[in-house]
Image (tube, rainbow, N blue to C red):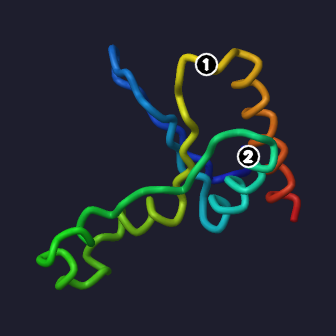
Amino acid sequence: AGTDLHLPRADAGAAPWRFSFLAGSGRAAPLTAALRAAGIDASNWYPALHRWYAAGRMQDEALFPHARRLTREIVNLWVEPRLTAADIARACTVIRSHLRLAVAA
């Protein structure tokens, strides 16, 4: 509540290799830094595919608002067998704490 955090919906039977969500404008990089400082694997990597191809690079960036938003707002958490319920709870605590601080600021 009180944030513009957007969580993904997983399709039945999906096997994601990472849990990606949108942290909101200006929050992704600081949140990722807080997660990394807590020893949690996180990144902001999202390659906007239109930049990979000459035809896409020749077009106005304004034509790709969703790709631009994802590039600015995405946070990726790794999903792998070595993670325990305690690891996941710790990541959630860091995220909630960081977002609470960001909202209060």
Residue 77 placement: quadrant: top right
Q: Residues within 10 Å of mark 1 (few under 14, many from 20)?
A: few
Q: Residues within 10 Å of mark 2 (few under 14, many from 20)?
A: many
Is 103 on the left or on the right of 54, as rendered? right
The residue at which mark 1 appears reads as 82
Q: Amino acid at mark 1?
A: Arg
Which numbered mark, 1 or 2, is in the foreground of this view? 1
Q: Amino acid at mark 2?
A: Leu
Residue 10: percent from the left, percent from the top? 41, 26
Residue 94: percent from the left, percent from the top? 80, 40
Residue at 63%, 58% in the rendered image: 28
Residue 78 placement: quadrant: top right
Q: Is residue 41 above or below residue 73?
A: above
The residue at which mark 2 appears reads as 35
Residue 42: percent from the left, percent from the top? 61, 46
- Which of pointers 1 and 2 lies earlier in the amino acid sequence? 2
The front one of 87 and 100 is 87
Quadrant of the rendering where the N terminus is positioned:
top right
Residue 80: percent from the left, percent from the top? 53, 24
Is 89 on the left or on the right of 55, as rendered? right
Quadrant of the rendering where the C terminus is positioned:
bottom right
Residue at 69%, 52% in the rendered image: 3
Residue 48 placement: quadrant: bottom left
Secondary structure type for disc 2: helix
